[in-house]
Amino acid sequence: MRLYKTSGGIIVEMNNTFYTTNEDFDTLVNRDNLYGYLSSPGKPATITAEDAKQLIQSSLLPPIGTQEVWAAGVTYLRSRDARMEESKESGGATFYDKVYVAERPELFFKSLPHRVAGHEQEVYIRKDSKWDVPEPELTLYINSKGSIQAYTVGNDMSSRSIEGENPLYLPQAKTYERSAALGPCLYIPEQPINPDTNIHMVINRNGKPIFEGTIKISQMKRTLPELAGFLFREMDFPTGCFLMTGTCLVPDNDFTLQPGDSVSISIDEIGTLTNKVVYRPVK
């Protein structure tokens, strides 16, 4: 089951049948059994498949309401190694090695909802950064009671040069305008997502792929409920929250994003999130 948020309302797709609802997004998704609610009898098809797909294509929004976006770091071995490489000159490499094996995960605030980009919208790279990468991540929607209800595709845009200069600069490396993208939908399965689920990323420059990779989420060191549990230990989220779960697809150290690049991230059963890379416009 997939839920799309559009400027014309919410569209739910189930077994290639579509229906619309004008329910408040936050109220709709913040349930203990979102799948059961959306699949219950009495929700007839109120829009044709053709009209639904056209509306999704023309007016799709990021699948987020008033929720904060948080992120987990160093949850894959490749991410640990990349962070150690970028921070070795500053003396901060050992911190990433330690957090990978620690009981407590790395969790950090990523974005407020108004800074989040959706599918086919622009993401930004910082003008004061020399080394920038996208980070493709399975992203959880967790309701206000701490229960994982849905999944989406996340792009955790990151400045590796700023983070590598000093680990204390992490907020500047991770949190800025349009540094997060979510979409294209919320995937709401009856059972937890399959560990064999693939994340695939392609970065295109001038219409040609310059990086491509695939990874299974089963390679994540920590479990998804574990990450959600740590996030909710001492915080409340009245309408739930989103949690990016880390990445394993890290381009080589000689790669950096450039304005005009296109990043496409696909996750099995969820779909593809595509964003164009630009500098933040001067206002």
Image: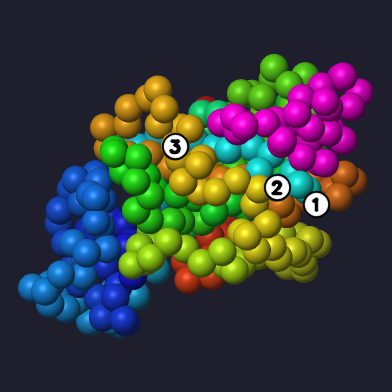
User: Residue 174 at x, y = what percent?
Assistant: 62, 31
Q: Is residue 276 left or right of residue 192?
A: right
Q: Earlier along the polypeptide chain: callout 3 or callout 1?
A: 3
Q: Position of residue 238 (x, y in %)?
A: 26, 32
Q: Residue at x 86, y 50 (%)?
A: 252
Q: Nearer the viewer, residue 250 or 218?
A: 218
Look at discs 3 and 1 and give the one toward the viewer.
3
- Residue at coordinates 16% horizontally, 78% vertically from top-left? 45
The secondary element bearing badge 3 is classed as: helix
User: Relative to residue 246, is residue 7 depicted above or below?
Assistant: below
Q: Which residue is mark 1?
A: 251
Identify the disc placed on residue 229. Answer: 3
Q: Is residue 222 visible?
A: yes
- What kind of element bears circle 1? loop
Judge from the rendering whether residue 14 lies leftward or rightward of residue 178; answer left or right.
left
**Mark linked to residue 76:** 2
